[in-house]
Image: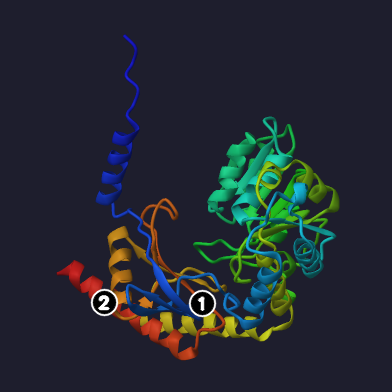
Amino acid sequence: MAEQRPDLRRRVQSARSSALADDLVRRRRVVGRRDGVRLEVDGRWLQNFCGNDYLGLAQQFQVVDALQNAASRDGAGGVASHLVCGHHVAHEALEREVADWLGTPRALLFGSGYLANLAVQQALLGDDDACVQDRLNHASLIDASRLAGCRLRRYPHADAEGALRQLKTVPTGAAMLATDGVFSMDGDVAPLRQLALAARMQSALLYVDDAHGVGVLGPGGRGSVAEAKLGVEEVPLQLATLGKALGGYGAVVAGDTDLIEHLAGTARPYLYTTALPPAQAAASLAAVKLARREHWRRDKLVAHVQRFRDGARRVGLQLLPSDTPIQPVLCGGNARALDMAAHLEADGFWVAAIRPPTVPEGRARLRVTLSAVHGDEQVDALVEALARARDRVDALHLG
């Protein structure tokens, strides 16, 4: 008698029951209106400390004006894939601007950072090749290795010697060493100079997903690669997202000319999807130009990070070692993180509770993110609210 096939509905119900029991169910919240760092949710205005609009460009008037003007001329859609008839002059201008900003010869525009990471590995790696990755890399980098079908090896977080050891375990086939530039849940920066040395010693290509670094770190906001004083020779490909510090949507892979040309001609996530709307590209172009010249935005971020960390230490919050706008407050258990987030919301602050599998078991946290358009008084008020939330939750749990 043939074995009975599993019922997918029952599997889903079982998984959901387990998630409920472990405080791991995620739910969407509906934002009614946005006004800078203020969001209206369920009829209440909350101070937003969980978004990625680090430079405050998402609603900047020149960026919005560029979007509206381009939409009035070119419409709302991308019409077709880039290699059919979807590649617009706005896309070309954005690619050139980002390449010039990051100091690379070429750049290629994608619909999202997720697609870009899938594209890079799918186009460059095959069954006989290997990708060595930091254990805390973004999920899209891990999924990209699975799509490519290559051998995936992971090393302890930020451990360049561990990366070198893993590269040595796959001596045959081509190799890529892939890392986040800034780690999205911890906020720390990868040891890029040491990783570049490990890659060179093992003839591997170093690829840096700098989604949370470009616009924020380095000279002129050029990101963690530039901050590490590395160039295209050491980092042949890097990713710059348009949806975080630049406030828009999409991503750009910048780097070596031959590699970019290869991606444009062979990467399935590039070939078989509609191009980003030209209006969105025009908005991102305006945002890049502002990010390049308005250094005060980064200066303000640096000051906010220091102010938050000083305040958090003063009230005894448990932080991770991060000098970026991502400031995780460790909570431990999932229920504790959710309870603290609920108390913060009651006080008018929106801070996301991050739980496994996004972070390791027992390392649930409140992921505080700072923006150049926050005020000093808002940062101070958040610190006070975090301390109150911790004390209330601890009193409840101890009671």
What kind of residue is marked 1? Leu
Label 2 crowd (10 A; few <14 / some 14-19 / many >=20): few
* For residue 174, side relative to residue 32 (left or right): right
Tag 2, which secondary structure?
A: helix
Quarter of the image for residue 350 reads bottom left
Quarter of the image for residue 47 reads bottom left
Q: Residue at x 61, y 47 (%)?
A: 133
Can see residue 198? no
* Residue 87 pos. (x, y %): 76, 55
* For residue 305, side relative to residue 395 (left or right): right
* Residue that mark 2 sits on: 391
Label 1 crowd (10 A; few <14 / some 14-19 / many >=20): many
Gap in angstroms between the C-alphas marked 1 and 2? 23 Å
Toward the viewer: 148 or 9? Answer: 9
* Residue that mark 1 sits on: 370
Tag 1, which secondary structure?
A: loop
* Residue 289 pos. (x, y %): 74, 76
What kind of residue is marked 2? Asp
* For residue 388, side relative to residue 123 (left or right): left
* For residue 220, side relative to residue 345 (left or right): right
Q: How many marks?
A: 2
Q: Is residue 6 above or below residue 215?
A: above
Asked if the residues shown at circle 1 and circle 2 are in contact, with their CB atoms under 8 angstroms apart, the answer is: no
Q: Residue at x 79, y 68 (%)?
A: 97
* Residue 94 pos. (x, y %): 75, 66
* Residue 310 pos. (x, y %): 47, 83
Can see residue 54? yes
Check the picture and name the quadrant holding the N terminus: top left
Q: Residue at x 39, y 58 (%)?
A: 363
